[in-house]
Amino acid sequence: MGNKIQFIDRLRLGFAVSVAKSVTFIVRSLRLGAASVLPGSIARRIEPRILELLSQQVKNGVILIAGTNGKTTTALLLCTILERKGYRVTHNSTGANLENGLMTALLESTNLLGTLNTDYAILEVDENIVPRVLKPLQPRIILCLNLFRDQLDRYGEVDTISKRWTKVISTLPVETVVIPNADDPTLSNLGQQLPQRVLFFGLNEPANYLEAIPHAVDSIYCPKCGHSLDYKGVYLSHLGDFTCPKCGFTKSKPTLESSEWSQILVGLYNKYNTLAAATAAIELGVDEATIRDTINNFQAAFGRAEDLVINGKRVRILLSKNPVGTNETIRVVTQSTDKTTLLVLNDRTPDGTDVSWIWDVDTEKLVERGGTLVVSGDRVYDLALRLRYSQKSPESSINLIVEEDLRQAIATALEHTPENETLHILPTYSAMLEVREVLTGRKIL
C-alpha cells in the first residue's frame, strides 16, 4: 500500500499511462465506446507490470471482490459507503473484470506521470482470473461471495475454481483479510483452511428457507470428505445451514447477525451482498450508523434490480445469467402481482456460449403463475422451447409471445403491461446492455 516506485519503473509507467490516456480520449471523443478495456491492454504491452505498479500506490489498499453472482452490487454498495466517509475510491464500475479492465480502472485515477491518487481500489474480479491477479494486486481484503456454475464452457466446475483460490490465497501475507460466504460449503471450507485472518458473512434466518432444495444445485456434498451434507434448510441453491454427518464439517459462524441488518434491494441474494459489504466496511473502520444509512438509501447498479420509468410505466431489470441467479429473479417476479415478464437470452462471449443452463432453471414456477411471457434474444427459440416444456398442460394460462427483434419485444411487453403494474425484464448480460440501450438511449460499455 502506497509503496514507492523505482525511477526506471516510473518512466516506463508514465509513458504507458500517457499512451493509455490518449487512447481513452480518442475512443470517447469519437464515441467508439467507453474505453473500459483497450487502454489497459495497450498500457500492459508497454509496461507488463502496470497492474502491480498501480496497485502499489493505492493508499489504504485494494479490496478484491470475486464470485459468480453479486460482484457489481456489493462493490457499488461498499464504494458508496466509503465515499460517504470522504474517501477517494477507484472502482471498475463498467463491469470490465478481466485484467485489462482492472488496469483501465486504475489508469482512470492516475495523472499523466503515472501517479495514482486514491484511498481505496475496489475491484470486481472474474472468478477465473483470481489466481493470476492476487500476486500483483496484493489485496488488503478479499471478498468471496459465492461459487455457482456459470459459463461451464469457460470455467468448469466450482470445486476446480475453489481449489485454485485456496492455493493462491494461502500464499498471501497473513495480514490479508479474507471474507467468505459462510453459507456456501465450498467457501466456508476455504475460509477454514486459510492462515490469514478470516471473517465470514451469511444468513441466520430460517424463516427464509426455500421449501425444497432446487434441482439447479451445485454443491451439496462435503468439500472435506465428499459425503452428502445434511441441510437444516437452504436459502438459495446450495447456500444454507449445513453439517456433514460423516466428518463433522459445518457452516462457519458469520461475523454479523443477519436479522439485525435491513436491505433495500429486492431478492434474498441482495441480502448476501448487503452483509458482505457491511462486513468489509466494519473491518475498514466505518461506523455502523453510516453503513446502515447508506444501505437504506442505496440505488441498484445498472441492470441489477434497477427500476426505470418508460412511457409512464415502471420497468425493473433483473440480470439473469445462470441457473441460480435466474431462479432468484424468478422468485422476485412470482412474489409480485405483476403479470408481464420479458425474458431475453443471448449466447455471446459475456453470456457464455453454452445456453443449456436454462434447463436447470425452475421456469415452471414462472409458467404456473400465468400472465404474459415475452421472449427474445439470440437464442429466443431455445428459451421459448424451455417455457413450453414448463407447461403442465397445453391449456396453460400463459400468453407466450415469441419476438426475435428485441426492440419490438420490449414494445410488445410494454403494451401488455397495465399502467399500475411493473414490467419485469430478465436478460442475460449482453442482453441487459442491449435492453438498457433501447430503454435509455445510451450504452453502458
Image (tube, rainbow, N blue to C red):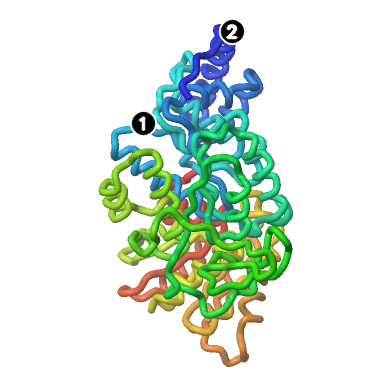
Residue at image position (50%, 71%) is 330
Q: Which comes sooner in the sequence, label 2 or label 1?
A: 2
Q: Quadrant of residue 186?
A: bottom right
Residue at image position (47%, 45%) is 444
**Front residue (pair 356, 78):** 78
Which residue carries the number 1 mark? 88
Q: Is residue 134 above or below residue 361?
A: above
Residue 283 picture location, percent across and down: 40, 42
- Assess disc 2: are there few (<14), some (14-19) or many (≥20) residues with their C-alpha within 10 Å of its C-alpha: few
- Please name the amino acid that badge 2 sits on: Ile
Q: Is residue 87 above or below residue 156?
A: above
Residue 262 picture location, percent across and down: 33, 61
Numbered badge on residue 309? none
Residue at image position (34%, 59%) is 261
- Please name the amino acid that badge 1 sits on: Arg
- Assess disc 1: are there few (<14), some (14-19) or many (≥20) residues with their C-alpha within 10 Å of its C-alpha: some
